[in-house]
Image (cartoon, rainbow, N blue to C red):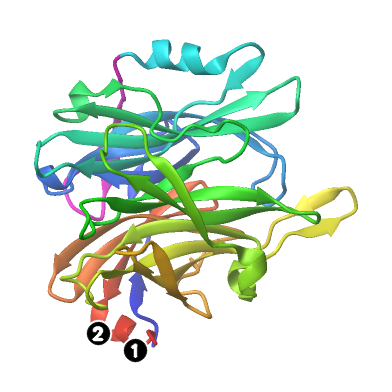
Amino acid sequence: MKGYIEHPGKAVETGGKFEHVMAISLDPRTGYKDGVIRCITNRAGDVATSGYIDRSVLYKVRGDSLERFSIGERLVIKNQEVVIAQLSGAGADFLGLEDPDIFIDEKTGLMHLYFTMPFHKKEKHGILIHLGHAVGNDIGSLEMTAPVLRDEGMASAKEVSIAPLNSNGVRNNLVESSIKEEDFDYSTVRVAIAEDMGKSWKFGETVFHPKERNIPWIGGHASPGPLFPKSFIDVGEGKRLGVINGREANRRVGDEIQYGMFSIGLFIYDYENGKIDWVSPEPFIQDSAARTITFASQFVEQGKGSGVLYAHVDDSFVRAYTLNADEMKQLLP
């Protein structure tokens, strides 16, 4: 049972502005017609091989339907240059804002935008990755604050997955982090504890380490994707079904580290306690055109038992997929 239909063509038209676009995030208050997308301004290297570097900017998108969006103006965030200067320090090269995620706070009505902030440390040949934050009434009035999670050389944070409030009024959100092992660096999934969505969060436990789980399709890198609403598929009190992005184990080929296939899988998250209960033993979605990457970033529920998932293929274009809840349930434990 497949559980999804791949839409033909690309979901985002670039108008010739960019060769590579990815990581769409949409505003639910406009019926998911407006949003933000990451656009690559320069790519050095190959996305299938370790060491490639992308430089990025965030742009607005607008769609007349859930199948077709177009890129508009560059996203302007107040106070951006000030915050970047404070974080850069001496000898750090800022690579641009990446991987946006929109969250609307129902209590305050404010929009929170989270994004990856990578700084390449030239003198140490390393990289610091913060989870950045901006807040405002809408996409056009965002102002950047300090990152909600800051990489102090011990733990990075990116690709946030927003969890519902638990019974203590806290969100056990998930982020992609990393752990350096003797053989390779691994992307892991870690809890990020948020008592206030606009202020500093706390790093929690690592809840998925690819090397320890021994699931071949997600044996090298793991990154949390969107959680489905309870109205789409209900997996029990205090839990949500979601998608998890996973990559096969790295391989050494001569002096290079080559990546395996990045696919979309399913997982069940116990957000009440901050635990992952289950990860699918096989991938859920591999795009028909993917050479190395299918990576989910946004889900929109359309009606009873149906929704649209957006993913980027080879970090180059955005595809839409229609998901069928009844078929997906047959893939669950």
- Residue in view at x 34 percent, y 75 percent: 4
Left or right for 243, reference 304: right
Classify mark 2: residues with Cα within 10 Å, few (<14), some (14-19) or many (20+): some
Mark 2 belongs to which amino acid? Asp
Mark 1 belongs to which amino acid? Gln
Q: Is residue 121 above or below residue 241?
A: above
Q: Quadrant of the N terminus?
A: bottom left
- Residue in view at x 27 percent, y 43 percent: 195
- Residue in view at x 74 percent, y 54 percent: 181
Q: Secondary structure at mark 2?
A: helix
Asked whether residue 248 appears in the rendered view, the answer is: no
Residue at mark 1 = 330
Q: Is residue 286 above or below residue 225?
A: below
Left or right for 228, reference 115: left
Q: Secondary structure at mark 1?
A: loop
Name the quadrant containing residue 305.
Answer: bottom left
Q: Where is residue 93 drawn, in percent x and y?
A: 61, 19
Residue at mark 2 = 326
Is the residue under label 1 in contact with that under label 2 (CB below 8 Å)?
yes
**What's drawn in magenta, residue-wise?**
61-78
Q: Where is residue 168 drawn, in percent x and y?
A: 22, 55
Q: Where is residue 40 drawn, in percent x and y?
A: 50, 33
Asked whether residue 107 appears in the rendered view, the answer is: yes
Classify mark 1: residues with Cα within 10 Å, few (<14), some (14-19) or many (20+): few
